[in-house]
Image (cartoon, grey):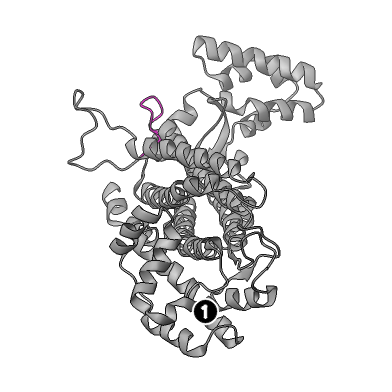
């Protein structure tokens, strides 16, 4: 079953309420750790833990005056905590809180994306097995090349998604770091040991070294990984768009009975979801470029990256969540037309077997140059005049005199071309054998049958 698109969850994660709530989590963890170390009175830490709270509206009111979001936040919390608030934010600089909290926010967003990635992989796996033995023409440069199966094409996408999952796990883990090293990263007020304890309390690792901020190569890698994922989704969507072209018509994104494709042309069935995915991939890739620009900051820190990250991190994670959900639904409900695939495969009347015929001639003692000349001559004539390539070959004594008729017939055997599909699937999916039918079939998929 396709999960409901989780935009609401991403919106919650990147909301002001959750952002400030995460800041508060970081502040309380720091205060309690410092209290355990004897740097903050325990009664103050207890009061902060029990009373610390805020109203988003009040934070915005204060920020409008002081022009500093963290000061506005600490002031709003202090108003609620009371006298013990003098120990709130003790020994910290703004980015000790902001960068560490951002790591937690990205961890929350990454959890959603990880589920999305796995769900798409599951859908791709199911549909790959469903069409494992469905023959179609493989195309290079947009031109008919040699036979493949539709399941083989989807297996390629599945394998790429496995690499995306591995890359994403690594990038998300690399973002799971916090810092409490102070205004320039030198631990003028706290110690590395305290930093490690606070981070551990939050489920984070301590950055080995930082300036006032966690170094932005981590963020650049994370955003670049999202861009690679977006590019894979763009690749899938672009392929389906090509397969949906009227002249090809081998696959098609789902089109409901009440859906309309054009205000002027009632016959249109446009690949709008595919086009949306391809378009949004451009945004995610451009955000990655902004992430690269954020790596170079002045000295121990400036804030040129800050305004950028307020846009690109929420936007990129939200877009990837949306695009993964869309692509899963696209693949799950996609119409597939095996008969059209077979008709297109056979439309060039045997030309697609020219490579096998070439090899068979070579194996029977014909030089590669002469074999190529013989085969290409008939192929070009068949193409230009719309003739049957196999019949032209069988009528040529220069070929039949060197290659037995049975061998010529085998050169045009489709199953000979596809003989290794099972082995490819065993490599991609770990050797599991499955029936050609999908494990589960959506209502829409049942309807298209």
Residue position for label 1: 31
- Judging from the image, what secondary structure is the residue with disc 1 in? helix
- Left or right of 183 in this view: 371: right
Q: Residue at x 34, y 73 (%)?
A: 79
Q: Residue 82 or 394: which is nearer the viewer?
A: 82
Q: Position of residue 123 (x, y in %)?
A: 44, 55
Task: Determine whether 28 is above or below 36 in the image.
Answer: above
Quadrant (top left/top right/bottom left/bottom right) for the N terminus: bottom left
The residue that appears at 70% across and 64% down in the rendered structure is 186
Using the image as rendered, state which of residue 337 and residue 27 is in the foreground: 27
Q: Which residues are magenta?
A: 244-252
44 is higher (above) or lower (below) than 308: below
Q: Is residue 20 left or right of residue 224?
A: left
Identity of the residue furthest to the bottom in this view: 43
In x, y percent, where is residue 283? 45, 39
Q: Is residue 71 above or below residue 399?
A: below
């Amino acid at each position: 079953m396709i999960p409901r698109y989780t935009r609401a969850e991403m919106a919650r994660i990147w909301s002001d309420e959750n952002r400030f709530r995460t800041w508060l989590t970081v502040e309380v963890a720091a205060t309690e750790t410092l209290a355990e170390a004897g740097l903050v009175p325990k009664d103050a830490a207890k009061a902060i833990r029990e009373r610390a709270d805020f109203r988003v509206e009040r934070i915005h009111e204060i920020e409008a005056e002081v022009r500093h979001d963290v000061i506005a936040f600490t002031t709003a919390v202090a108003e609620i905590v009371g006298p013990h608030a003098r120990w709130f934010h003790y020994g910290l600089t703004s980015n000790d809180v902001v960068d560490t909290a951002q790591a937690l926010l990205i961890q929350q967003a990454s959890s959603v994306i990880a589920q999305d990635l796995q769900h798409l992989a599951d859908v791709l796996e199911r549909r790959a097995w469903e069409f494992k033995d469905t023959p179609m023409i493989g195309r290079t440069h947009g031109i008919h090349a040699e036979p493949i199966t539709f399941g083989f094409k989807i297996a390629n996408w599945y394998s790429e998604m496995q690499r995306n999952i591995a890359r994403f796990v690594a990038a998300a883990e690399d973002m799971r770091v916090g810092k409490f090293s102070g205004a320039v990263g030198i631990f003028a007020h706290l110690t590395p040991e305290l930093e490690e304890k606070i981070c551990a309390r939050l489920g984070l690792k301590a950055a080995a070294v930082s300036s006032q901020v966690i170094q932005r190569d981590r963020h650049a890698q994370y955003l670049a990984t999202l861009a690679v994922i977006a590019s894979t989704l763009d690749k899938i969507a672009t392929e389906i768009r090509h397969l949906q072209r009227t002249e090809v018509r081998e696959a098609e994104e789902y089109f409901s009975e009440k859906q309309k494709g054009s205000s002027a042309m009632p016959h249109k069935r446009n690949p709008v979801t595919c086009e949306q995915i391809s378009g949004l991939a451009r945004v995610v890739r451009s955000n990655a470029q902004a992430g690269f620009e954020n790596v170079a900051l002045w000295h121990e820190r400036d804030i040129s990256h800050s305004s950028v990250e307020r846009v690109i991190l929420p936007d990129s994670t939200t877009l990837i969540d949306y695009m993964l959900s869309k692509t899963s639904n696209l693949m799950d409900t996609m119409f597939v037309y095996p008969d059209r695939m077979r008709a297109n495969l056979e439309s060039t009347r045997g030309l697609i077997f020219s490579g096998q015929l070439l090899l068979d001639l070579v194996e029977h003692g014909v030089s590669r140059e002469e074999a190529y000349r013989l085969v290409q001559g008939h192929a070009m004539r068949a193409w230009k005049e719309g003739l049957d390539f196999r019949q032209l070959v069988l009528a040529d004594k220069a070929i039949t005199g060197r290659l037995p008729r049975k061998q010529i017939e085998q050169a045009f055997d489709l199953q000979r071309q596809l003989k290794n599909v099972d082995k490819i699937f065993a490599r991609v999916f770990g050797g599991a054998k499955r029936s050609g039918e999908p494990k589960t079939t959506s209502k829409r998929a049942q309807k298209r049958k």
